C-alpha cells in the first residue's frame, strides 16, 4: 500500500472535509525550501509550512544543536525544575523583544500562547479585585482553536458550531483612515458599558484573514486608549514574529508596546512544537501573593522542553545572522519588483506587502474553501509550487533561505495563473 492509501485508513486531517477531499499528498523528505513527495516530484514550499520553517527545512545548524541537546537532557517537568536551555532562551528572547517585556511563560503552540495571554489578562484584573470579563478583538481575526483563543477569533468558518460557548468578546473593525474615528468612539462606548479586561490583536497583518494589512499609526491610537483605561493589550505575533514583517516583531513598528506578546510558529523553526507568552513585570507582579489562589495555575506537560528551547536558541542566532538578514532584504526587494510587474493586471484586484509577506487578491468571486480555490491550489502543485490560497487571495511567505531561482519560479506560476483565469 502507498502512504496515501495507508493515510486514509486512520488519519483525520485539519481544515479538511474528507468526503470531498479524501486525498493527502505524502511528503517523504524536506530540505531548504523544497518538499519531496512520494510521487518523486519536488515542490517549492512557498509558505514555509504555515510560516514555521523560515530558516529552511532540516537546517544543518539547528540539527547540530538538537543532536547535542538530545544527548544531554530530553525532557523535564518545568513545575519546580528548571534547566539552562530555558534560561538561555528567556535571556535571548528578552534581549530582542520590546523593552517592556520581562517574563516568559512556555506552552505548546500558537493557540495556547494566546490562551495563556487571555487567561493572564483576566486573572490580572481578578487578582486586583476587579471583575472584568470582556475582551475586545478585531473582526475576522484568528488567534487559534482553543476556546479562549477561538472566542477572540472572528472567522465563523472555523468557529460556527461553538459560538454559543464563547467568552464575551466585542469586535471592532481593523483601523484605516476612514474608520479610525468611529472605532475610537466604539471603544470608548464599550468601556463605559462593559467591564473590558483586554484587547487582543494581530499587529499589522491578519494572517488567516487573507493577509489583511493595516497601518501601525492607527493601531497605536487604539493601544493608547487601552493603556489609559488599564485594558491589557495582547499582541498575537504567532504569525508575524521573528522577522517576517521586516523587523524582528511587528510590534517594533508601533510606539505603544503591548503588555503581553504571544509567540510560536517560527520560534522553533518548524522543528518541534513550542510557544511563548511574554509579559511585563507589572503583569507578573499581580500574581505574587501569600495566597496560592493568586498564582497562575496553567501548565503544559512539555512546557519549556529542553530540545525545543535549544531549537529556538539556534533559530534566534540564525535570524540575527548577516546571511539571513541579507536574505530577508533580498526577498523584500524581489517582492516589490514582482508587485510592480503584476499589480495592474486585469485579474488582480489589489496587492499588498509587509516585509517578506506578499499577497494579491484575484479579481474573481470564489468561496474560501470552494471548488475554484482547490483548482488554483492544484494549479500551483502541478507546477511544483506549494501555495495555499486563502479564498481569492494568493500569498507568498517563503523560507528566508529560498533561492532567487526558486522565488522566480513561484512568481512565474502566479503569472501563469493570471493568464488562465
Image: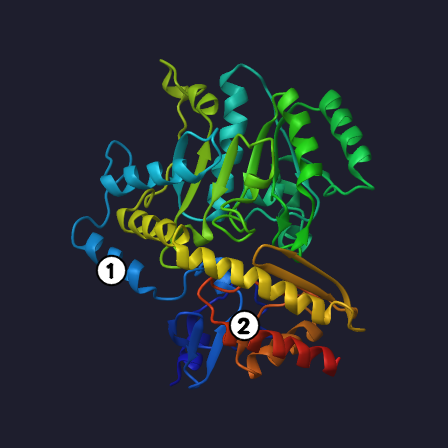
Residue at the far left: name it: 71
Can you tell which of label 2 and label 1 is closer to the viewer? 2
State the mark number for residue 299: none
- Write down the quadrant of residue 172 in the picture: top right
Asked whether residue 24 appears in the rendered view, the answer is: no
Residue at 65% x, 20% y is 228
Residue assigned mark 1: 64
Residue at 62% x, 24% y is 227
Q: In the rendered view, does 22 fall on the left or right side of 33?
A: right
Residue assigned mark 2: 407
Q: Earlier in the sequence, mark 2 or mark 1?
A: 1
Q: Residues within 10 Å of mark 1 (few under 14, many from 20)?
A: few
Above or below for 154 versus 414: above
> Along the line of sight, which residue is nearer the eye, 356 or 114?
356
Above or below for 227 versus 3: above
> Along the line of sight, which residue is nearer the eye, 322 or 67?
322
- Write down the quadrant of residue 97 in the picture: top left
Above or below for 181 versus 227: below
Q: Determine whether label 2 and label 1 are within 8 Å by CB.
A: no
Amino acid at each position: 500500500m502507498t502512504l496515501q492509501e495507508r493515510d486514509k485508513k486512520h488519519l483525520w486531517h485539519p481544515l479538511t472535509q474528507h468526503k470531498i477531499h479524501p486525498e493527502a499528498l505524502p511528503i517523504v523528505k524536506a530540505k531548504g525550501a523544497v518538499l519531496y513527495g512520494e510521487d518523486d516530484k519536488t515542490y517549492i514550499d512557498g509558505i514555509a509550512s504555515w510560516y514555521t520553517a523560515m530558516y529552511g527545512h532540516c537546517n544543518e545548524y539547528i540539527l547540530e544543536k538538537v543532536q547535542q541537546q538530545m544527548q544531554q537532557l530530553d525532557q523535564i517537568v518545568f513545575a519546580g525544575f528548571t534547566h539552562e536551555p530555558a534560561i538561555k532562551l528567556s535571556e535571548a528572547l528578552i534581549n530582542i523583544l520590546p523593552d517592556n517585556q520581562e517574563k516568559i511563560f512556555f506552552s505548546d503552540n500558537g493557540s495556547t500562547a494566546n490562551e495563556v495571554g487571555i487567561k493572564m489578562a483576566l486573572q490580572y484584573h481578578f487578582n486586583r479585585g476587579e471583575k472584568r470579563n470582556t475582551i475586545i478583538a478585531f473582526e475576522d481575526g484568528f488567534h487559534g482553536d482553543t476556546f479562549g483563543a477561538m472566542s477572540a477569533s472572528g472567522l465563523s468558518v472555523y468557529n460556527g458550531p461553538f459560538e454559543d460557548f464563547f467568552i464575551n468578546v466585542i469586535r471592532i473593525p481593523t483601523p484605516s483612515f476612514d474608520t479610525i474615528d468611529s472605532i475610537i468612539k466604539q471603544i470608548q462606548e464599550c468601556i463605559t458599558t462593559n467591564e473590558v479586561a483586554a484587547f487582543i490583536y494581530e499587529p499589522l497583518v491578519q494572517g488567516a484573514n487573507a493577509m489583511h494589512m493595516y497601518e501601525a499609526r492607527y493601531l497605536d491610537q487604539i493601544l493608547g486608549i487601552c493603556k489609559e483605561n488599564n485594558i491589557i493589550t495582547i499582541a498575537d505575533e504567532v504569525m508575524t514574529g521573528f522577522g517576517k514583517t521586516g523587523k524582528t516583531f511587528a510590534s517594533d513598528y508601533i510606539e505603544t508596546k503591548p503588555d503581553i506578546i504571544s509567540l510560536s510558529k517560527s520560534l522553533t523553526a518548524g522543528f518541534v512544537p513550542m510557544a511563548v507568552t511574554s509579559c511585563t513585570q507589572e503583569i507578573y507582579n499581580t500574581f505574587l501573593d501569600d495566597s496560592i489562589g493568586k498564582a497562575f495555575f496553567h501548565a503544559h506537560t512539555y512546557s519549556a522542553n529542553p530540545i525545543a528551547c535549544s531549537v529556538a536558541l539556534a533559530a534566534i542566532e540564525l535570524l540575527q545572522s548577516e546571511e539571513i538578514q541579507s536574505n530577508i532584504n533580498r526577498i523584500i526587494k524581489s517582492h516589490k519588483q514582482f508587485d510592480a510587474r503584476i499589480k495592474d493586471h486585469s485579474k488582480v484586484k489589489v496587492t499588498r506587502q509587509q516585509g517578506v509577506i506578499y499577497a494579491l487578491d484575484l479579481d474573481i468571486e470564489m468561496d474560501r474553501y470552494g471548488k475554484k480555490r482547490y483548482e488554483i491550489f492544484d494549479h500551483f502543485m502541478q507546477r511544483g509550487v506549494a501555495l495555499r490560497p486563502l479564498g481569492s487571495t494568493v500569498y507568498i511567505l517563503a523560507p528566508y533561505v529560498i533561492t532567487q531561482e526558486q522565488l522566480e519560479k513561484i512568481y512565474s506560476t502566479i503569472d501563469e495563473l493570471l493568464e488562465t483565469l
